[in-house]
Amino acid sequence: MNMIRSALFAAAVAAVTAACLSAFAQTPSGSLPQLAPGESLGRALGIRSVPNLRDVGGYKTRDGATVVCGLVYRSDTFNPMSAGDINKLKRLNLKNDYDLRTTSEVKVKPDQMPPGMQYHLLNVLADAKSAAPAELEALMHQPKKANAVLGGGKIEALFMEAYREFISLPSAKESYRTLFLSLSDRRKLPAVFHCTTGKDRTGWAAAALLTLLGVSKETVMADFLRSNEYTLPQFRHAIDSFVAGGGERDIPVAIFGVKAKYLEASFDEMQKRYGTIENYFTDALGIDAAGQKVLRELFLGRK
């Protein structure tokens, strides 16, 4: 069963990648918004090519501190990028690009970044057992058949299982360990981490970091769900076409968007295995209390 779920999730990733090739972001282009000190709150930066590019900073912690803005960003894939949007990226002075996608995703859509950035592939799903990633992509063109295979909450259950694998897969542990160790090095910042749509593998990375820093669970969830504002509009045509063919709207919405139950599955798996976010960083990622202190001091402006 886990092999089937892994295969279907890999297929969902492939379906999103394929849809991205034909559906370009519909968010308006423009200059980067000017945020007040301490303000971010999950707002996208208004770069049309990467509608889900957001500053991770700006949130308040439970003890009243503020996560520093301008150090790390979360995003969807940097392909295709217009020349104008690449110039806007230059203004962020990014030094490192941490790509959480699979090798097959990268092969189809390699990042297009400003010159001078260091690129790092961290394949979170490398150990996921995928047999037929084209299966789900084909189902998206057969809405009625998709209803039988993925309807009735089946697709949501698939994603919930995948979010649990963000905690359990050896490749996920190694990828997130490398990411967070890199982010604890001020010399490597500002940096960005991303996947295909910036919502699943990226969503857990952002949620784990913010939780470690002391941001409330409610705020972390609000940040996670904010991806829907920036990803679902990209796929409006694909969703409408699927529904017009007799498909259940909930199926593509579950694939192209996020639901609270997805992130809750990651937290549930993390708590079952490790108990606390601190133990997750120590026991799963090999980042001890001293390493966690470095992250907190850096991202809360205490160092």
Image (cartoon, helix red, strand yellow):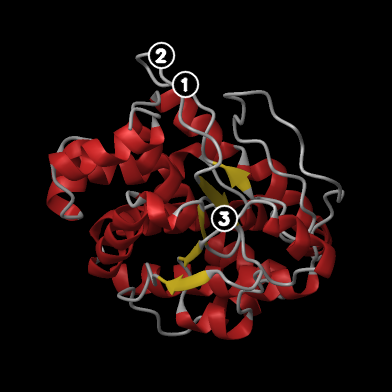
Q: Position of residue 275 (x, y in %)?
A: 16, 36
Q: Describe residue 270's horizontal placement relative to residue 69 as left or right.
A: left
Visible residue check, residue 1: no
Is 36 placed above or below 159 here?
Answer: above
The three-letter code of the residue at mark 2 reads Gly
Q: Are marks 2 and 1 in contact (CB under 8 Å)?
A: yes
Give above or below for 275 relative to 266: above
- Label 3 residue SS: loop
Give the farthest residue toward the top. Answer: 64
In the picture, which quadrant includes the C terminus?
A: top left
**Which sits earlier in the primary sequence, circle 3 or circle 1?**
1
Q: Residue visible at 12% across and 50% down?
A: 283
Q: Residue beneath label 1, please?
A: 60
- Dot 3 corresponds to which residue? 198
Q: Quadrant of residue 226?
A: top right
**C-alpha separation, residue under disc 3 versus residue under disc 2:** 28 Å
Tell me the mark number nearer the camera, choosing from 3 and 2.
2
Question: Please, what secondary structure does the residue beneath circle 1 have?
Answer: loop
Disc 2 crowd, CA 10 A, few/some/many (<14, 14-19, 20+): few
- The number of numbered discs placed on residues in the rendered structure image is 3
For mark 2, give the secondary structure: loop
Q: In the drawing, does residue 242 fall left or right of residue 77?
A: right
Alpha-carbon distance for marks 3 and 1?
22 Å
Q: Who's the residue at 31% across and 59% down the image?
A: 165
Indicate the amino acid at tag 3.
Gly
Query: Is 298 or 249 nearer to us in this picture?
Result: 298
Residue drawn at (15%, 41%) of the image: 290
Query: Which mark, residue 64?
Result: 2
Residue nearest the viewer, comparing 185 with 230: 185
